[in-house]
Image (spheres, rainbow, N blue to C red):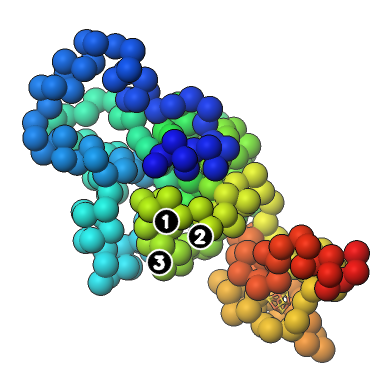
Amino acid sequence: MFDKLKKAFGGSDEAPKAEKKVEAAPVKEEVKAEAPAETKAASAKPRIGYIHLSGCTGDAMSLTENYDILSTVLTDMVDIVYGQTLVDKWIHGTFAEEMPEMDVCLIEGSVCLQDEHSVHELLEAREKSGLIVAFGSCAVTGCFTTYARGGQQAQPKHEAFLPISSLVKVDAALPGCPVAPEMIAKTVVAVCEGDLDYLKPAMDLAACNAGCGCDVLTNVIRQGLCSGCGTCGLACPTRAMGYSEGRPSCDRDRCIKCGTCYVMCPRSWLPEGRIKKETGL
Ligand code: SF4
Ligand code: SF4
C-alpha cells in the first residue's frame, strides 16, 4: 500500500530503510524475529512520526481536537513511533535513542537555518521517512515566521525561517493556521486507505511554498474564476480578507501569509480543462 502511495506522491525515491533491511540484511531479520508480539502487531499499522520545528504546536492541538474519533485514529489506525509532544522516547518498552524509520512523518513549523539541531532533524526525517507531510502553514509557507528578522534574545542570530520544502522534498502539504481537525483526521484515514483522490490536492500543494492573500487575486480573480462566494474570507484566521463589490481584497498588514484563503477557495482546484472551458483561455 505504501509503495503505491510513494509512487503517487512522487516522494522519496528511497524505500524506508526498514524495508531495505528486511530484504538485504539477515542480521536485521533476526532482530525482527526477536521482537515482542506487541511490536509485530503494531508494525502492521502505518508508522507515523511527528516533528516539531519552529511552530506553535497549534497543529498538534488541532489534531487532538478530533475528540470523538481521536483514540480510533491514533490508537487503532496508526502507530505513533516518534514525536515530541505526542509520545516520549519509550516505544513498546524499548528506549529509542534515535529517530526511528517511519512510513509518514508530519512536520510542524518552519525550519530555522541558524538552528543546527532543527536542520539536522529535518534532514534526518527525510532520510528515515517514506512520506513527508508539511503539517500546518508554518511548515508549508513559513506563515508568520516569514516575518522573523532575528535580533531577539536569547538567540539574536536566529533570523532565517524557511518552509521545509526549501530544504527537503515534501510529499504532501496541509496548510492552515492551524490545519482544520477534520482535514487532519481525513488525511490520516486517506493515507491508511491509499485514497489518492482525497490526497491529490495535498500532493499538488507539496511543492508550493508561497502563501499570501494575493494568491486569490492572482490565481482566481485575475483568471476570471471568482464567484464571490466568500469562502476565502471565512477561512482567513486574521480577517485580512475583506470584500469590495462582491470580490475579495486583502489587507496586507493583517495577512500572516498562511495560504489558507487560496487553498479553501472552491475555484482554486478546478481541473485545468474546466478552467479553460469557463474562461476560454
Ligand atoms: S473563495 Fe474563491 S471564489 Fe469565493 S470569493 Fe474567495 S476568491 Fe472568490
Ligand atoms: S489573507 Fe488570511 S487566509 Fe489568506 S494568506 Fe493572508 S492571513 Fe492567510
**x, y (%) of residue 98?**
29, 26
Label ID, residue 190: 1
Q: Quadrant of residue 17?
A: top left
Residue at the spot of label 2 = 198
Image position of 21 with respect to 73: above or below: above
**Residue 266 falls left or right of residue 9:** right
Q: Is residue 97 above or below residue 202?
A: above
Residue 36 location (% of width, % of height)? 8, 31
**Quadrant in the picture for residue 259:** bottom right
Gap in angstroms between the C-alphas marked 2 and 1: 7 Å
Are discs 2 and 1 less than 8 Å apart at CB? yes
Q: Which residue is mark 3?
A: 181
Looking at the rendered structure, the secondary structure element under dot 2 is helix
In the displayed structure, would residue 180 be above or below residue 53? below
Image quadrant where residue 247 sits: bottom right
Side (left or right) of 250 relative to 11:
right
Q: Give the quadrant of the N terminus.
A: top left
Q: Which amino acid is tagged 3? A: Pro
Position of 112 with respect to 27 (left or right) is right
